[in-house]
Amino acid sequence: MRPWRDRTGVFETLDYDHVTIDTSHGPMLYMEDITVSFDGFKALNNLTLTIDDGELRCIIGPNGAGKTTMMDVITGKTRPDSGTVFLGQTLDLLKMSETQISRVGIGRKFQKPTVFENLEVRENLALAMKGPRSVWRALVIKLTGDQRDTIDDVLNTIGLTAQSLNLAGGLSHGQKQWLEIGMLLVQQPRLLLVDEPVAGMTHAETERTAELLTQLAGERSVVVIEHDMEFVRSIARTVTVLHEGSVLAEGSMSEVQQNPRVVEVYLGD
Ligand SMILES: Nc1ncnc2c1ncn2[C@@H]1O[C@H](COP(=O)(O)OP(=O)(O)OP(=O)(O)O)[C@@H](O)[C@H]1O
Ligand SMILES: [Mg+2]
């Protein structure tokens, strides 16, 4: 393949939009001995964690445990002092930029919804699709049939088919969160990272989000950080408890709930 200049002027030799993530003999994500220090304070302290292909993993732990920092490392926002992070067997994420990491198939949902309020739900999804496109191009240029099919599928998955022509600004808080998940799905990520998705949601929205994330795992890996224990219990197969930047415990929800150290530092009250 011929190298070309990307938008920042750097020569690229790899087409990051079409990289294959090789999980044939190993996990989707492999992090080993990751340490992140902020002014001498270790937000992550030799963190080692693997996520399998198709897995739904919940990450819990007290405030300041390093959960969000872990996602910052995976997405390239924060560079660790030491350690290893691989996506599949071949992609060394510590050698890639934030943009490259998002293009090889890691989608991250931040806590606050960031949808375009003045655009329709469907337009938000069209804008989020892969490929270089300005806002103007996304709205003016006709989508291909495949792209329209992808958008219809995603609308159906996130339960917003009936709202597809509504302005995103008129959606409820929960619906905006689902739309934002949809904006990640149109990019067809293999690993979806979701930080506190149900904060501020109604009970019904929380239940719907549990169904949605459960449905999304399988075809892709999903990592969810949440403090809402009822929600975690309703979706979790494997739970990882972080504490002071390391894994304190890992197992089924009932296993970690019975772990005395977990009870002491997190679930006690
Ligand atoms: N950019 C930064 N500069 C300095 N300290 C930071 C920075 N980012 C995080 N920290 C510190 O690192 C520690 C871990 O923070 P992090 O946000 O990862 O925790 P968390 O587990 O996500 O907590 P919460 O449940 O409250 O969201 C905290 O003590 C935090 O203050
Ligand atoms: Mg956090």
Image (cartoon, rainbow, N blue to C red):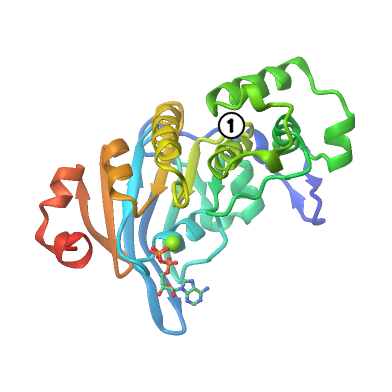
Query: Label 1 neighbourhood size at 10 Å, few (<14), some (14-19), many (20+)?
Result: many
Q: Which residue is mark 1?
A: 188
Image quadrant holding the N terminus, namely top right
Name the foreground residue: 48 vs 158: 158
User: Percent x, y for residue 62?
Assistant: 31, 65
Q: Residue at x 42, y 58 (%)?
A: 84
User: Seen in the image, is 186 located left or right of residue 89?
Assistant: right
Q: Residue at x 60, y 41 (%)?
A: 176
Residue 269 position (above or below residue 207)? below
Residue 189 figure quarter: top right
User: Percent x, y for residue 6?
Assistant: 79, 49
User: Percent x, y for residue 20?
Assistant: 55, 33
Q: Residue at x 76, y 33 (%)?
A: 123
Name the foreground residue: 188 vs 262: 262
Q: Amino acid at mark 1?
A: Gln
User: Percent x, y for residue 205?
Assistant: 45, 38
User: Seen in the image, is 195 located left or right of residue 63?
Assistant: right
Q: Residue at x 47, y 51 (%)?
A: 200
How many marks overall? 1
Residue 254 figure quarter: top left
Residue 116 position (above or below residue 145)? below
Residue 212 position (above or below residue 267)? above
Please, what secondary structure does the residue beneath circle 1 have? loop
